[in-house]
Amino acid sequence: MRSALLLSIHAFLGITCAEQGHWRAPRKHDSRGPCPLLNSLANHGFLPRNGKHIRASVLVDALDDALHLSDSGRAFFQAQGEKALTISTDKDNSTFNLIDLKTHNVIEHDGSLSRADAAINCGDNWTFNKTIFEETKSYWPNETISVRDGANALFRRQRSAKSVNPSYDLPYEQLVNAIGQTAMYLGVFGTYATGDANRTWVEYFFENERLPYSLGWRRKGDGEAISKEGIESLGALVAANWLQINATTPS
Ligand code: HEM
């Protein structure tokens, strides 16, 4: 009876399970960092809204709640969480804060899609940068972002960042991370088999640090849970396209 009443109140207010995680803009002392997805999860309350003192297990549960992970996907992101702990500014290193992720060349790197390089922006490599993101958007010509267009946008942004940053540096490990991050947004807002992300969803996500529920995006369903294999195979497709563009574009 009580749950039936709650359900009808929710229906009346337009609150559905698909829209779980009420979005709220970050407040003054909240911690946010260079990853648009983790910032979004904090804005929705999947991660602590203050973005602080996050355990690797809490990170994995938040990603699962928001996006839907398979067991191998959980293991993949557990390892990412453990990497984040290595750059934690918390006392006992069993938790991290979103701003800690700005540490250069651990996961954060030069040549981002929506952030400036630390060296040319007074150390701010983590704040969303509209000018840079407008450039990225100009490389996505179609309503869906193909693997090719995703790889091309990354390649062009890296070229452009290098041209204005005399100390530009993208070690191999960070190039792999950057390619992985392109695969991440293509997979979450498209499919892990082919990429083909919905451009409107991707742009809304970056610009608002908000999951695009209002535009029709939903958590992955049964049979679509995000797996390590899916992330790696889409990453390999992005890498193959990036390498081909690099080999055929005059310097
Ligand atoms: C499905 C999960 C995830 C998605 C969809 C995602 C998405 C992204 C995207 C699209 C970027 C590129 C931003 C840009 O170039 O401007 C990025 C950057 C970043 N992400 Fe995530 N991310 C995910 C999980 C994680 C996790 C688990 C961590 C660490 C614990 C993380 C840490 C970072 C960091 C440090 C950057 C900055 C890289 C840079 O310098 O551009 N991300 N992420």
Image (spheres, grey):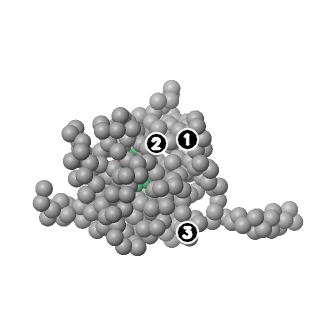
Amino acid carrying mark 1 in the image: Gly
Quarter of the view holding residue 137: bottom left
In x, y percent, where is residue 64? 54, 56
Q: Which residue is mark 3?
A: 215
Would you name the residue on which mark 2 appears?
33
Q: In front: 9, or 232?
A: 9
Residue 240: give x, y in percent of width and height.
23, 64
98 lies above or below 77: above
In the rendered view, would you say 150 is above or below 123?
below
Furthest-right residue in this view = 1
Q: Secondary structure at mark 2?
A: loop
Label 3 vs 2, first from the N-terminus = 2
Ligand 1 within 8 Å of disc 2? The answer is: yes
Q: Nearer the viewer, mark 1 or mark 3?
A: 3
Q: Is residue 138 left or right of residue 9?
A: left
- Residue 29 place in picture, x, y as percent: 58, 35
* Picture quadrant of residue 156: bottom left
Mark 2 crowdedness (10 Å alpha carbons): few <14, some 14-19, many ≥20:
many
**Can you say whether 162 is above or below 11 in the image?**
above
- Image quarter in which the C terminus is found: bottom left
Q: Are marks 2 and 1 in contact (CB under 8 Å)?
A: yes
Q: Work out how far the residue at label 3 is from the one at label 2, CA to CA, in angstroms.
A: 25 Å
Count of marks placed on residues: 3
